[in-house]
Image: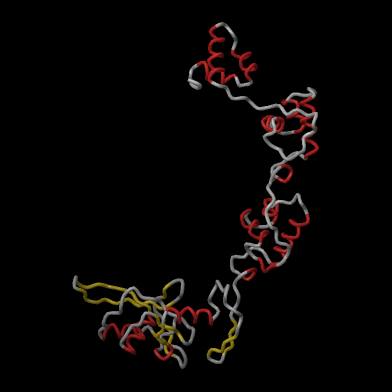
Amino acid sequence: MGITPSRRIPPLDAKAKQRFWSKVRKTDGCWFWEGPLRAPNRYGHFSVTFDTPYGRAAGGFAAHRIAYYLANGDTPLDILHSCDEPQCVRPEHLRKGTASDNAQDKVLRGRCRSGKVTPVFKVVNLGRPRTTTLYHGENHHFAKLTDAEVRAMRERYAASPMMTAAALAREFPVTKGQAIKLLTGLSRRQAGGPIAEYIRPSVGQRHPNAKLVPEQVLQLRAKYAEGLATMSALSVEFNIALQTVSNIIRGKIWKHVPVPSNLVIVPGHTKLTNEQAKAIRLRRLQGAMQLPLAKEYGVSLDTIQQVLKHRTHA
C-alpha cells in the first residue's frame, strides 16, 4: 500500500542519494528504512532540499517513493508494497498502481475496517495464507454489545409492554438513540431476535422519571374532585411536586389513563377576551379587589395585574 503525494519528487543530487541509502538496512528479503517514520502508518520519511523559481526549498517524501523514483525514474500516484512491510524500500518489492488497486490491496491484506460488503475469503501472499475479517456487528472495533446482548435487549422489549428504550439504554452501555436503532432493526439486524415495528412512547408509568402508577393517578384525582385533600396535601402524600399534582388534576399529563365518568377534571386557566379585560378594568375602577376578580374569571392574580397595567389586552 502507498501514500498519495501532494507533489512530484524533484531531482536528487549525488549527496542526497548517498544520504538516503545510508539510512537503509539491507537484508536478504526486505530493505528496511531506519530513518524517521511518518505516524500513524509508520512509512519512512525522507527530507530533501531543491531549487524552485523562488529559491531553495525543503520538502518531505515517503521513503519508499524515493526508492521507487531512484530505481525507475518516475513517481506514479500510488506505489504498493508486495511484501506488506511499510518500512521496506527495496525497489523489487515496490510496484505502481492506482487508488483502486491500493484499496483492493488493503482489503486483501485484512486492513479494511468497514468490511460490510467484503466476503470472508483466503488469499495466499508470499506463501503465507491470510484471511480477511468482517468488521461489522460484534466484530466492529467500536461495537459495545455482542450479538447475544442485542438479542436479549430485543426479547426483553418484546416481552414486557412496560419496558422502554430509555430503560434498556441505562442498563446496557449504549445511548437511547442507539437502543432505538437496535430495537427497530436499523442497526445490528443480523444479530437476531424480535424486531419492534415501532417504539412505544415513554408516557405514564413507562416514563423513566415516573413515580406513580395508573391506580395512584385515579386515586389522586378522585380525592381532589371529592374535596378530600388539597393539592399541597396530595403533593406530600404521593411524594411528588406540587406542579406535577396540578398537571395530573388538570389532565395535562397521564392523559392515557381512563377517567371515571363521575370524576371531573379541573380545567386550566381560561383565556380572557378583550371584552372581559375591559370589564375587569372597569370593575377595578369601581373598587373591586384583584384576587376576587382572578377567581371569578379563572385566571391568575398576575394575569389580572398585567391586564390592569395594559401590558396585555391593550
Extreme residue in the top direction: 286
Taking 101 as reference, is 223 left or right? right
Q: Within the image, what quadrant is residue 10 found in?
A: bottom left
Residue 276, image x, y percentages: 57, 17
Q: Within the image, what quadrant is residue 182 found in?
A: bottom right
- In this picture, is 24 found above or below 242? below
- In this picture, is 84 found above or below 41? below
Q: Residue at 30% across / 86% down in the picture?
A: 18
Q: Within the image, what quadrant is residue 143 found in?
A: bottom right
Quadrant (top left, top right, bottom left, bottom right) of the N terminus: bottom left
Extreme residue in the bottom direction: 28
Taking 221 as reference, is 11 left or right? left
Residue 213, image x, y percentages: 77, 40
Residue 242, image x, y percentages: 69, 29
Taking 267 as reference, is 314 left or right? left
- In this picture, is 96 found above or below 282? below
Residue sitting nearer the eye, 74 or 309: 309
Residue 20, image x, y percentages: 33, 83
